[in-house]
Amino acid sequence: MAITRGSFPLMHQAQVKTWFDDLQSESEHIWRKLYKVTPTDAPFEQITNHSGFGPMVEKEELGGITFDSALQGFSTHFTVLNLALGYAISTYALDDDKSNRLHRILTEALSRSCAETPELLAFQIINEAFSNTRLYGDQKPLCSLTHPAVGAGGGVSQNRPTIDCSFSEAAAEDAYINIARWVNGKGIQKNLRPQMLLVATENDANAYRYLNSIGRPGTANNDPNFTKDTNKFPKGYEATPYIEDAGQWQIITNALNGLTCFERQALKFGEDIQMTSLVHRYIAHRRMVFGCSSWEAMYGSPGL
């Protein structure tokens, strides 16, 4: 029997995988700038918050120590998604594709789909941050005026403006104040800070001017740019077409458990040759899930 390329499939597969990996490395992967990626070996995860402790209590010289108690709070569940996509091509089509042009186009198209899928899943969480159809452990949407705290000391907190508004200097300053006022269930300050401004592509120019103007943006007054001079956004801003509403904006904070991606299996690419039908199948698959472990991850508005 004559030796064919099918006798050495790994040699051909290595070249195809290089095409696939090259496009992955060229992709921007915006979601990685926003989400904390945590490996997991389970098909699901659960994050539960708690009330925390109150401040220290003065102790008399011979008196006893005060022992505080913590209360279990709200839980957020993550169920890992099994994601896969592929294409099949006949051996004859490969044989006729002498320059590998068609094969490379198809492989790069598959790679682009694999790069796009996490963006869509990640920004689905962000786009639905104001929707009552996606509720979290406290039975509130991600951005709400009435997030309840666990324990008697915290009351409720808001991570959106009382009246929805477009992004502006005044809206940002109001956000800074609200974020600084967040407390835990025992009344302890959370001491969170803004990290990144997230806007739709339509607000790209406005965000750039707001963060980078030497003077106060939008005015002829000789005032300093408070946001720029105090480095309110150490990670800058991101303008992205994945935000569906042109007026929507969010401020990402430095919350320890915020936007979260649990990754069960990293992206894999492989080839399966079905000799009985002379069909080559190229498959990419991964296992992951996106969510938000705590509403303190962001402050924002759907705009007007």
Image: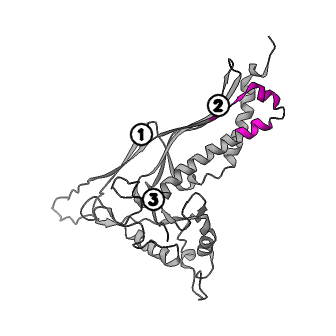
Residue range in magenta is 86-106
Residue named by callout 1: 44
Identity of the residue furthest to the bottom in this view: 221
Please rate how many residues cluster around mark 2, counting C-alpha atoms within 10 Å: few if below 14, some from 14 to 19, many from 20.
some
Specify whether 43 is left or right of 2: left
Q: How many marks?
A: 3
Please rate how many residues cluster around mark 3, counting C-alpha atoms within 10 Å: few if below 14, some from 14 to 19, many from 20.
many
Amino acid type, label 1: Phe
The image quadrant that residue 21 belongs to is: top right
Q: CA distance from mark 3 to mark 2?
A: 36 Å
Residue named by callout 3: 129
Residue 86 locus on image (x, y percent): 63, 35
Where 11 falls versus 185 (above or below)? above
Residue 282 locus on image (x, y percent): 66, 32
Q: Residue at x 44, y 37 (%)?
A: 43
User: Which is more toward the observer, 114 or 226?
Assistant: 114
The image's colour scheme reads one colour
Pointers 1 and 3 in contact (CB under 8 A)?
no
Of the residues under marks 3 and 2, which one precedes in the sequence? 3
Q: CA distance from mark 2 to mark 1?
A: 25 Å
Give SS at disc 2: strand
User: Which is more toward the observer, 152 or 17?
Assistant: 17
Give SS at disc 1: strand
Specify whether 241 is left or right of 257: right
Where 299 falls versus 120 (above or below)? below
Pointers 3 and 2 in contact (CB under 8 A)?
no
Label drawn at residue 270 = 2
Q: CA distance from mark 1 to mark 3?
A: 22 Å
Residue 287 shown in magenta: no
User: Which is more toward the observer, 85 or 14?
Assistant: 85
Which quarter shows the N terminus? top right
